[in-house]
C-alpha cells in the first residue's frame, strides 16, 4: 500500500498528525449533529486532498464502490417494492393470524420488524410498520408504547442477521469479501436467541396491560389485509426481483459476482419492469422519481467517510493503532474478540456506528497477519458486527430508527423521552451483548 514519508510536512506538520486533526474535527462535528453529516464528510475528504495527504487517485482508490453499489441498488428495490403495499399487508395479516390478541400482536410485530430489518434498512422498516401499529392499537384501545419500543429494538437486532440488514454489516461484507450466507450462518442464531428473550421479557412485563375486549378485537379482524396491496402487478414483479436478488446473494461466490453488482442489476431489472409499458415523459418521470428516493445523503456520507478513513490508513495512523491494540490484547484473538464486542456496543450506543466501524476495519486488518491471518481473525470481525449493531439499542440516539420512531410517537401523543427510553434500552442492549458474548465464547472461545 502506498504511504507517505513521515519526513514530509502537511500545513507545517507531520502528515499523520494532520490526518488525525482532520478526522477528529470532522467526527466531532458529525457527532454533534449541528451540520449535515454528508457535508462534513465531504469537506473532511476535501481537506485530505487539499492538504496533500491524499492525491485524487488515492482518494478514489479508497472509496469502496461495492458498498455504494449495494446500498444504492437495495434502496431502489425497496423504494419500488414499498409502492406495492407488501409490507403493510404482512403486518395486518400477522395481526389477524393471532386473532388480534394484544400479546400475540406484540410478538408478531416484533418478528415482522426483525425480519424486514434483515432485508431493508431499519429506518424504512419502522416507517412502514409504525403507522400500521398505531392503527391496530387504536382499534384495540391499548397503548402503542410497548409495541413501539419493541419495534425499535427489533429493527436494530434484526438488521444484525444479514449482510444487507445494517450498514456496519455492508461495510464488513465488502471489506472482507463475505457473502450473504456467511452472515446468516454465523449471526442469525444469535439474533434469533436475542429476539426470543426480548419477546419473553416484554410479554412478562407488559402482559397485564395488553388486554382488549372481544368487540375491539373484532374491529381488527374486520381489517382486510388485501386492501394494503396498492398494485398487484407491481407486487408480483417486486417479489420476483427480490427472490432473484436474494438467491443471487446466497450463491454469489459460485456465480463469481460481487454483492454490489447483484443489487444494482436487480434494481435496474425492477426499474425496467416497473416502467416497461409506460411511454414518453411519464416513464422518465417515474424513473427520476425512484432515483430521487435513494438516500443520497447517506451515499455521499459514505463517499466522504471512505476518503477520510483512507487518509488515516495511508499515513500509517491506523497501523500504529493496530500495533497498540495488539500489545494491549497481548496478541490474543480471544481478548480482542471480547474487547471489540463491548467497546463497539458502548461506542455505538452514543455515536453513529458507521464511522466507528469504517475506522475499525482497516485498523483491525492491520493486525490480521500477526494473529494468523483472516481465518484466525474472524471471531473478532463477528464481534465487531454484533457489538456495533446491538449497541444501537443503547440510547435514543444510538440508531436513526430510534429517533424516527420517537418522532412518530410524539406526533401521535405517545412521546418517548430520552430518560424513559434508557430504562428499557440499557437493559435490552446489555442483554443482547451478553447473549452475543456467550455465543462468541461457545463458538470461538
Image (cartoon, rainbow, N blue to C red):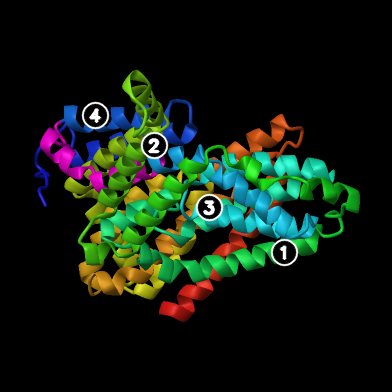
Q: Is residue 213 magenta?
A: no
Residue at 41% x, 71% y is 185
Secondary structure under tag 2 reads helix
- 3D distance between C-alphas at marks 2 and 1: 43 Å
169 w.r.t. 432: above or below: above
Instruction: Give the labeled residue for mark 1.
Output: 201
- 3D distance between C-alphas at marks 4 and 3: 39 Å
Query: Residue 173 at what x, y percent from top left?
Result: 32, 57
Q: Nearer the viewer, residue 294 or 430?
A: 294
Image-based side of 185 in relation to 130, left or right: left
Q: Is residue 53 magenta?
A: yes
Instruction: Give the labeled residue for mark 3.
Output: 116
Q: Select label 1 or label 3 by which is in front.
A: 3
Q: Quadrant of residue 309?
A: top left
In the rendered image, the residue lying farthest to the top is 281
Residue at 66% x, 38% y is 131
Crowding at label 4, few (<14), some or many (≥20) Cα neighbours within 10 Å? Answer: many
Secondary structure under tag 1 reads helix
Instruction: Give the labeled residue for mark 2.
Output: 274
Instruction: Give the labeled residue for mark 4.
Output: 47
Q: Earlier in the sequence, mark 4 or mark 2?
A: 4
Q: Select label 1 or label 4 by which is in front.
A: 1
Query: Residue 183 at what x, y percent from top left?
Result: 39, 64
Crowding at label 1, few (<14), some or many (≥20) Cα neighbours within 10 Å? Answer: few
Q: Select label 2 or label 1 by which is in front.
A: 2
Q: Earlier in the sequence, mark 1 or mark 3?
A: 3
Q: Select label 4 or label 2 by which is in front.
A: 2
Amino acid at each position: 500500500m502506498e504511504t507517505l514519508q513521515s519526513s514530509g510536512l502537511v500545513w507545517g506538520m507531520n502528515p499523520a498528525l494532520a490526518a488525525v486533526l482532520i478526522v477528529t474535527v470532522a467526527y466531532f462535528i458529525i457527532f454533534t449533529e449541528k451540520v449535515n453529516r454528508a457535508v462534513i464528510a465531504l469537506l473532511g475528504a476535501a481537506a485530505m486532498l487539499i492538504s496533500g495527504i491524499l492525491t485524487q487517485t488515492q482518494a478514489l482508490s479508497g472509496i469502496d464502490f461495492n458498498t455504494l453499489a449495494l446500498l444504492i441498488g437495495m434502496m431502489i428495490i425497496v423504494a419500488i417494492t414499498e409502492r406495492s403495499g407488501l409490507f403493510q399487508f404482512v403486518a395486518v395479516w400477522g395481526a389477524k393470524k393471532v386473532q388480534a390478541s394484544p400479546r400475540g400482536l406484540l410478538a408478531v410485530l416484533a418478528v415482522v420488524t426483525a425480519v424486514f430489518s434483515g432485508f431493508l434498512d431499519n429506518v424504512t422498516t419502522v416507517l412502514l410498520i409504525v403507522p400500521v401499529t398505531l392503527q391496530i392499537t387504536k382499534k384495540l384501545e391499548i397503548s402503542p408504547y410497548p409495541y413501539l419500543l419493541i419495534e425499535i429494538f427489533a429493527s436494530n437486532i434484526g438488521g444484525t442477521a444479514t449482510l444487507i440488514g445494517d450498514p456496519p454489516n455492508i461495510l464488513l461484507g465488502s471489506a472482507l469479501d463475505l457473502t450473504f450466507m456467511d452472515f446468516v450462518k454465523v449471526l442469525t442464531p444469535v439474533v434469533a436467541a436475542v429476539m426470543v428473550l426480548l419477546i419473553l421479557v416484554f410479554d412478562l412485563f407488559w402482559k397485564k396491560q395488553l388486554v382488549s375486549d372481544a368487540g375491539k378485537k373484532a374491529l381488527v379482524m374486520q381489517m382486510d389485509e388485501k386492501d394494503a396491496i396498492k398494485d398487484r402487478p407491481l407486487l408480483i414483479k417486486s417479489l420476483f426481483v427480490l427472490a432473484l436478488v436474494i438467491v443471487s446473494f446466497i450463491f454469489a461466490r459460485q456465480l463469481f459476482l460481487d454483492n454490489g453488482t447483484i443489487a444494482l442489476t436487480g434494481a435496474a431489472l425492477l426499474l425496467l419492469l416497473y416502467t416497461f409499458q409506460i411511454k414518453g415523459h411519464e416513464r422518465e418521470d417515474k424513473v427520476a422519481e425512484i432515483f430521487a428516493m435513494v438516500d443520497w445523503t447517506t451515499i455521499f456520507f459514505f463517499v466522504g467517510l471512505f476518503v477520510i478513513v483512507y487518509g488515516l490508513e495511508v499515513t500509517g495512523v491506523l497501523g500504529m493503532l493496530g500495533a497498540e491494540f495488539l500489545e494491549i490484547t497481548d496478541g490474543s484473538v480471544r481478548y480482542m474478540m471480547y474487547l471489540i464486542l463491548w467497546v463497539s456496543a458502548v461506542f455505538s450506543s452514543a455515536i453513529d456506528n458507521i464511522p466507528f466501524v469504517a475506522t475499525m476495519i482497516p485498523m483491525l486488518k492491520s493486525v490480521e497477519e500477526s494473529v494468523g491471518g483472516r481465518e484466525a481473525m474472524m471471531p473478532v470481525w463477528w464481534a465487531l458486527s454484533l457489538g456495533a449493531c446491538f449497541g444501537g439499542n443503547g440510547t435514543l440516539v444510538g440508531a436513526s430508527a430510534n429517533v424516527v420512531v420517537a418522532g412518530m410517537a410524539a406526533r401521535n401523543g405517545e412521546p418517548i423521552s430520552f430518560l424513559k427510553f434508557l430504562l428499557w434500552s440499557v437493559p435490552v442492549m446489555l442483554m443482547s451483548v451478553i447473549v452475543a458474548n456467550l455465543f462468541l465464547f461457545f463458538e470461538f472461545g
